[in-house]
Image (cartoon, rainbow, N blue to C red):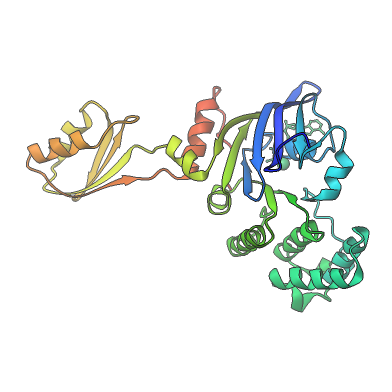
Amino acid sequence: MPNGPELAIRAEHVTRDFGPVRALDALSLEIPKGIVFGFLGPNGAGKTTAIRVLLGLIDPSAGHAEVLGLDTRRDGSAIRTRCGALLEHPGLYERLSAYDNLDFYGRAWRIPRGDRQERIRELLTRFGLWERREDPVGRWSRGMKQKLAVARAVLHRPALVFLDEPTSGLDPVATAGLREDLAALAAQEGVTVFLTTHNLNEAERLCAQVGVIRGGKLLAVGSPEQLRARGDSGRVDILTTGITEELVRHLAGLPDVRTATASGDHLAVSLSNGASVAPIVAWLVQHEVGVEEVRKVRATLEDAFLDLMGAETTNGEAAGGTT
Ligand SMILES: Nc1ncnc2c1ncn2[C@@H]1O[C@H](COP(=O)(O)OP(=O)(O)OP(=O)(O)O)[C@@H](O)[C@H]1O
Ligand SMILES: [Mg+2]
């Protein structure tokens, strides 16, 4: 095997051009087996293109990628046999029942009858769809269809599954439900999940690692924790006694203080990058302001994401969707 068994995906400087459009720009990525990896980025960032390259559906213009140790250029069909995928189209037959949809795919995967029945029952039960298994899928809600589409993608117990925006168009409850199902699936079956999403909240809750892509370039990769740390908000909330407007104005003029605002006894200070809060507290104490509590406000993944988008935005265009 050309790569270690611990890697599910390895991309090395993968570039993909569509005419004049560079959809992927020297993308390098290493994704270990058994994790949920979230690929984040605004519309047109190159997420779907990356999945298509990794599945061997299109070739890179330059660079090289391996999936489960297989070369995407050479072994595309072997990769597609070993992987599950949910691309933009859910791939369901609307006139067939849910059960028959899965049964159809199970036959296509040549899963023996007994195993097939057991697996279908297991997945439909897990996704809360078992009671409705005889309904034609055309009558189902979007969320139910989406769950069925995920069930279809993992039916043959692939080692790796690609899910392109699995929760797009779902309401918050359905999103949370599917997210939990995906987390359980990943944990119980040890399947590696590569998903794309615009939903940072989702990525933060579900993914062990996330990659942020924009304009075909990978801007950052790491755990949500690590990315949040990069986007350290620099914000500190201080609960005081006796802060005055005049002191707030003074505070705002101190070195390392970007902004300072107070509402009642709550003081919110934004520090410049990497600055320590200790001198601020000392200054307050010196000015006879009581300090009851100091709390660093953690950056969310969304802060980090917008930070990254902002850093790469040179022409003032919008930072990209976060819904
Ligand atoms: N078949 C194609 N022919 C021409 N251009 C393409 C093709 N596929 C993708 N592109 C271009 O490549 C870029 C990346 O597209 P891609 O679909 O990978 O983005 P995405 O990150 O999946 O976006 P979204 O969040 O909207 O799904 C876009 O500029 C797109 O127009
Ligand atoms: Mg896409």
Q: Nearer the viewer, residue 301 or 138?
A: 301
Quadrant assignment, res 21: top right
Quadrant assignment, res 300: top left
Q: Is residue 320 above or below residue 144?
A: above
Q: Nearer the viewer, residue 290 or 64?
A: 64
At 67% from the left and 56% from the top, the residue drawn is 190
Q: Judge left or right: residue 31 versus residue 2.
A: left
In percent of width and height, residue 225 lies at: 47, 44
At 85% from the left and 38% from the top, the residue drawn is 57
In percent of width and height, residue 191 lies at: 70, 54
Is residue 97 in view? Answer: no
Q: Is residue 231 above or below residue 13?
A: below
Is residue 122 in view? Answer: yes
In percent of width and height, residue 162 lies at: 74, 48
Q: Is residue 40 above or below residue 186?
A: above
At 72% from the left and 62% from the top, the residue drawn is 147
Quadrant assignment, res 53: top right
Q: Nearer the viewer, residue 265 or 203?
A: 203
**Furthest residue to the bottom?**
131
At 48% from the left and 34% from the top, the residue drawn is 307
Q: How many marks?
A: 0
Quadrant in which the N terminus is drawn: top right
Q: Judge left or right: residue 132 versus residue 104.
A: left
Q: Judge left or right: residue 323 versus residue 192.
A: left
Image-quarter location of ligand 2: top right
In percent of width and height, residue 7 lies at: 68, 41
